[in-house]
Amino acid sequence: MLLIDFYYVTQRFTEARHMAQRMLEGKAGPLTVSGRAYPQFALAAAMFWTDGRAKAVPEYLKVLQGRFAGGWKTVTEYRAAYCAANLARDVADPKTQAQARSILAALVRSPDQNEYTYKARITLARDLVKEGHWAEGVELLKTFPDKSGPYKDLANYYLAKYAKDYAGKSN
């Protein structure tokens, strides 16, 4: 894994992809189901750079093992859910876009509060505003707990921006 991460952070994405594939093929020893999550995530991240978002999204989704509506337990699962949903928002296929929206909504509804549920909240709120549902987006931005630190600050930035941009408008 360290070698995969090294290749990734040094922007040697082809090598990172190759090493992740080798791990997933069992060439570095057998992996448990949960042990496959991070190499699978690393493969998806490298594929984003080598093959584009449309090919990376299904690889991120493999980390979730079919659990697209929540029930994630590890940071890698939350991270993969957010990455898949965020990237899929801009894939041309409407089915993939709908799945992205569903995963973002599941992250927002998650009882867990972490970096990826906060990012999902910001992303979904911005999408709602962009789509003309600014009141719903604004309400979502108001749900950040104080403990969310910079994410609450970012939500407040967008709240101020939208208050100015949408003054006097209704949904």
Image: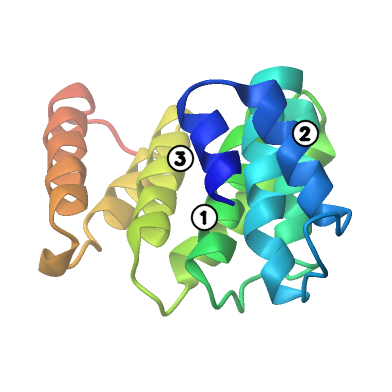
Q: Residue at x 80, y 30 (%)?
A: 55
Residue highlighted by disc 2: 18
- Percent of width and height locating residue 27: 85, 54
Looking at the image, the residue that sits furthest to the right is: 25
The circle on residue 128 is 3
Residue highlighted by disc 1: 79
Q: Nearer the viewer, residue 150 or 2?
A: 2
Image marks 3 and 2: residues in contact by CB distance under 8 Å: no
Say above or below: 165 vs 8.
above
The image quadrant that residue 95 belongs to is top right
Say above or below: 22 vs 13.
below
- Percent of width and height locating residue 40: 72, 52
Question: Three-letter amino acid code at disc 3?
Answer: Leu
Q: Earlier in the sequence, mark 1 or mark 2?
A: 2
Q: Earlier in the sequence, mark 3 or mark 2?
A: 2
Question: Three-letter amino acid code at disc 1?
Answer: Arg
* In-image side of 147 versus 171 (left or right): left
Answer yes or no: is residue 68 visible. no
Image marks 1 and 2: residues in contact by CB distance under 8 Å: no
Image marks 1 and 3: residues in contact by CB distance under 8 Å: no
Q: Residue at x 47, y 23 (%)?
A: 10
Disc 3 crowd rating (10 Å Cα; few below 14, some 14-19, many 20+) is: some
Say above or below: 137 vs 49.
below
Q: Which one is in front in this view, the residue at disc 3 or the one at disc 2?
A: 2
Question: Three-letter amino acid code at disc 2?
Answer: His
Disc 2 crowd rating (10 Å Cα; few below 14, some 14-19, many 20+) is: some
Q: Which one is in front in this view, the residue at disc 1 or the one at disc 2?
A: 2
- Percent of width and height locating residue 74: 53, 72
Figure disc tally: 3
Q: Residue at x 78, y 70 (%)?
A: 31
SS state under label 3 = helix
